[in-house]
Structures are given as C-alpha cells and as structure tokens.
Image: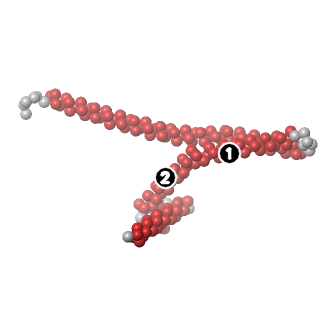
Amino acid sequence: MEDETMSVSMNRDNRKDSIELRRFKVQELLVKGYNHYEIADTLQIPGSTISGDIQYIRQQAQENLHEHIQERLPEEYQSCLTGINRILRLTLDIAEKPTTTDDKTKLQALALANECYKAKLDLTTNSVVVTDTISMLKNKLDHLNINDRELTQDIQENKLKKDGEESQQQQQTPSGIF
C-alpha cells in the first residue's frame, strides 16, 4: 500500500516536471520567434496543448508583473532613493569639509552630488510611470467591478420584468374558467 502511494506521488511529480519542461521549451521557442504551428511541429505536440501552454505562460507573466509592481518595485524604489540620499550626503560632506583643500576633490564631489540630484529627479519624475501603471491596474479592477454590478443589476431587472409578466398573465386568466 505504501509503495503504491509513493509510486503515485512520483508519477505526479514526474508529470509536473515534464509539463514545466514542455512549457519552458514553448516559451524558449516563442522567444526565438516561432509561431503556434511551428512550436507544435517542432515539439511534436498538438496545437491545442501549445495554445494552453501559451495561455498559462501569459497568465504567469501577468501574475509576475502584478507582484513586481505591487511588492518589489516600491521596495526597490525606496532603496534606490535612500542610497542616493546617502551618497548625496557623503559627497556634500566631502565637498564642504574644511579639511578638503584640494579643489579637484571638491569639484569631483560636487559633480557626484549633481549626478545624485539628477538621479533623484529621474526617480521622482519616472515614478509617474509606476503610479500610472498601478492606477491602470486599479482602473481595470474597478471596471471589472462595475461590469459585475451592471450584470447583477441586469439579472435583477430581468427577474422583476419576468415576475411582472407572470403576474399580468395570472390576472388576465379568468378565475374558474379553463
């Protein structure tokens, strides 16, 4: 009994591994510019399987992008801004330090400070792209919620209309006469 369970588990793991390997190969061929038919022909797999794999790959890509935008990007943005601020502070300390008498060192520190200011500006102005992306995702979610509400409202209206029609039919039927 224990051997059968282990065998079933191993078969499931092997099947999962082979599906992942096939999807990896499909994605690799997509990157190389192959179309559906060429991939199916190359891998000797039915086109419907390739379509399913491509759909799965796209879904995974959307989930990864969503995770990246929601979780990783804000953290990386904050880390970059913190690092730039730290470098800026250190370079300004060097440039303004009374013991720094070499003009060349002061100019290099100020040039680096200038680069930090440019990097901060770039981060803060390009964050608009990030904000727009997040807003776009929220708008899509809002749009889906609105569609869901409209669909629910249509179903309720149709039910009320149907109930009203049935009520009118019952009132028009003379009682006792069939």
> Which residue was labeled with disc 1?
79
Under tag 1, what secondary structure? helix
The quarter of the picture where the N terminus appears is bottom left
Q: Is residue 5 left or right of residue 170?
A: right
Under tag 2, what secondary structure? helix
Residue type at mark 2 is Gln
- Residue visible at 83% across and 44% down? 109
Residue type at mark 1 is Ser
- Residue visible at 46% across and 59% down? 53
Residue 24 place in picture, x, y as percent: 52, 62
**Mark 2 neighbour class, 10 Å CA radius: few under 14, some 14 to 19, many 20 or more:** few
Q: Is residue 116 placed above or below 34 in the rendered structure?
A: above
Q: Is residue 168 placed above or below 90 in the rendered structure?
A: above
Q: What is the quadrant of residue 74 in the picture? A: top right
Q: Are the two marked residues, 1 and 2, in contact with CB atoms closer than 8 angstroms?
A: no
**Residue 15 visible in the shown view:** no
Residue 156 place in picture, x, y as percent: 32, 34
